[in-house]
Amino acid sequence: MRNLSEGRAVHLLDVENLVGNARPAIRDVRTMMARYRERVPTGGMDQYVAAVNHGALVPVGLALAGIQLLVRSGPDGADGALGEVIRLDHLADRFERVVIGSGDGIFADFAGWLSGRGVLVVVVSRPESLNRRLRRTAAQVISLDLAA
């Protein structure tokens, strides 16, 4: 019987962290996503989950039409929403690779937890926002330079 996770990846996008702005413009989100797709290997079975605060919902929703979008306000709201996906959605059973699109240190423990369950954890981050502990925990780090 084929393993259901084989060849599949989920991309968890902390959009505000990847763009570097809590209230990004549509064009900034589109630029970030274009760079992301240039730099990050993807497959036909990949899934995307993006999280933002309520103030970024409209521009991010318009820029990333078709991607599952979670909204949570407050300090680290988007991080919390993505953390719930990691904890509650059985990612280790469903995906061979989890791509964390954020440099926030809060994801270091999640990355370690996923790695301990045999999941390949890749982190995509702007170099200036990558937490050292998260860098050490990930199997691979991909730099997302938006100025390029």
Image (cartoon, rainbow, N blue to C red):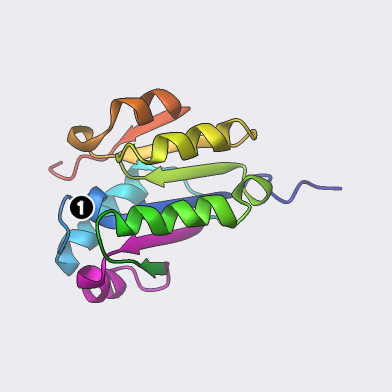
Q: Mark 1 sits on what residue?
A: 19
Q: Is residue 56 magenta?
A: yes
Q: Residue at x 20, y 52 (%)?
A: 19
Q: Residue at x 49, y 56 (%)?
A: 84
Pick the front one: 15 or 111: 111
Q: Position of residue 111 (x, y in %)?
A: 48, 36
Q: Is residue 45 visible?
A: no
Pick the front one: 7 or 16: 16
Q: Residue at x 73, y 51 (%)?
A: 4
In the picture shown, does residue 51 fall above or below 113?
below
Q: Residue furthest front?
A: 74
Q: Residue at x 48, y 27 (%)?
A: 139
Q: Position of residue 59 (x, y in %)?
A: 21, 72
Left or right: 23, with 141 as reference point:
left
Instruction: Answer with the quarter of the image where residue 51 lies.
Output: bottom left
Pick the front one: 58 or 41: 58
Instruction: Answer with the quarter of the image where residue 138 lies.
Output: top left
Left or right: 61, with 100 as reference point:
left
Q: Is residue 137 magenta?
A: no
Q: Position of residue 32 (x, y in %)?
A: 24, 53
Q: Amino acid at mark 1?
A: Val
Q: Position of residue 130 (x, y in %)?
A: 26, 34
Pick the front one: 121 or 137: 137
In the picture shown, does residue 105 fall above or below 22?
above
Instruction: Say which element carries label 1.
Output: helix
In the picture shown, does residue 120 fall above or below 146?
above
Q: Residue furthest top?
A: 136
Q: Could you classify mark 1 by the number of other residues whose Cα lies within 10 Å: few (under 14), some (14-19), or many (20 or more)?
A: many
In the picture shown, does residue 143 fall above or below 80?
above
Which portion, as a residue range, is magenta?
A: 47-68
